[in-house]
């Protein structure tokens, strides 16, 4: 059964894959606890390497800055913290680190939230409405994953648009062009 509390679903980091031919990017897959639905996101490949060090138990990580800072702050599973994915903006999931004990909240970059969760065990959750919009069925051991267009960076959208035109996939090209135009309009209004 999925862990749902106050309109949230607890997530688990399941996979990290390098995007071949990309400019230093990787894809992460997070699922609900029942492994029935997932979200995917693009992160920097350097952060993917850091996450994999922790996931694979590479020795010496306890001396790295994130682990040292966490130990100084005495932050861990027994604390009343949560990382909440609550929105998507500018091709990035928006995450807040919540401390219920001190009643504080702080914005944190998505990939840093993943690393913090990996190091401390602090749970990472997603707003159920956002999960229903961004999520897709989870199928382990497949060769590719779907990435929602609103979490793809503008540069990658332009590359995908060029490829769609080259392949004469005009329906996809129109969809990508519309997303690019919508982002440009939003930037002009902000």
Image (cartoon, helix red, strand yellow):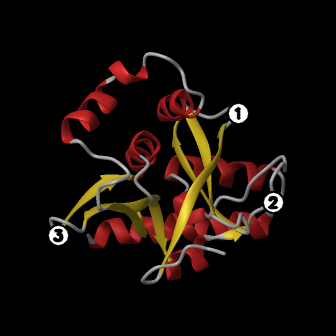
- Residue bearing mark 2: 139
Q: Is residue 90 visible?
A: no
> At 51% from the left edge and 76% from the top edge, which residue is drawn?
130
Instruction: Give the alpha-carbon distance from disc 1 to disc 2, as whole Å.
Output: 21 Å
* Picture quarter with the N terminus: bottom right
Left or right: 142 in relation to 138 = right
Left or right: 162 in relation to 10 = right
Instruction: Give the alpha-carbon distance from disc 2 to disc 3, as whole Å.
Output: 37 Å
Residue 28 picture location, percent across and down:
60, 48
N-term-proximal mark, 2 vs 3 = 3
Left or right: 139 in relation to 153 = right
Looking at the image, which is closer to me, 145 or 152? 145
Residue 116 picture location, percent across and down:
38, 44
The answer to whether marks 2 and 3 mark residues whose Cβ atoms lie closer than 8 Å is: no
Q: Which of pointers 1 and 2 indicates the residue nearer the eye? A: 2
- Residue bearing mark 3: 103
> At 65% from the left edge and 58% from the top edge, which residue is drawn?
147
The answer to whether marks 1 and 2 mark residues whose Cβ atoms lie closer than 8 Å is: no
Residue 161 picture location, percent across and down:
67, 55
> At 33% from the left edge and 19% from the top edge, which residue is drawn?
63
Q: Is residue 186 visible?
A: yes
Under circle 3, the secondary element is loop
- Residue bearing mark 1: 20
N-term-proximal mark, 1 vs 3 = 1
Q: Residues within 10 Å of mark 1 (few under 14, many from 20)?
A: few
């Amino acid at each position: 059964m999925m862990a749902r509390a106050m309109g949230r679903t607890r997530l688990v980091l399941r996979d990290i894959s390098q995007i071949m031919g990309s400019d230093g990017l990787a894809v992460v897959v997070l699922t609900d606890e029942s492994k029935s639905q997932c979200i995917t996101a693009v992160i920097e490949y350097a952060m993917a390497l850091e996450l994999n060090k922790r996931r694979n138990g590479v020795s010496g990580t306890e001396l790295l800055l994130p682990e040292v800072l966490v130990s100084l702050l005495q932050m861990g599973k027994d604390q009343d913290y949560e990382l909440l994915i609550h929105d998507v903006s500018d091709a990035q999931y928006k995450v807040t680190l919540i401390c219920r004990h001190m009643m504080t909240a702080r914005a944190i970059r998505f990939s840093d939230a993943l690393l913090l969760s990996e190091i401390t065990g602090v749970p990472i959750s997603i707003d159920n409405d956002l999960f229903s919009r961004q999520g897709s069925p989870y199928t382990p051991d497949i060769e590719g994953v779907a990435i929602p267009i609103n979490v793809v960076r503008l540069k990658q959208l332009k590359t995908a648009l060029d490829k769609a035109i080259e392949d004469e996939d005009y329906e996809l090209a129109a969809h990508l062009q519309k997303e690019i135009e919508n982002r440009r309009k939003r930037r002009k209004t902000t």
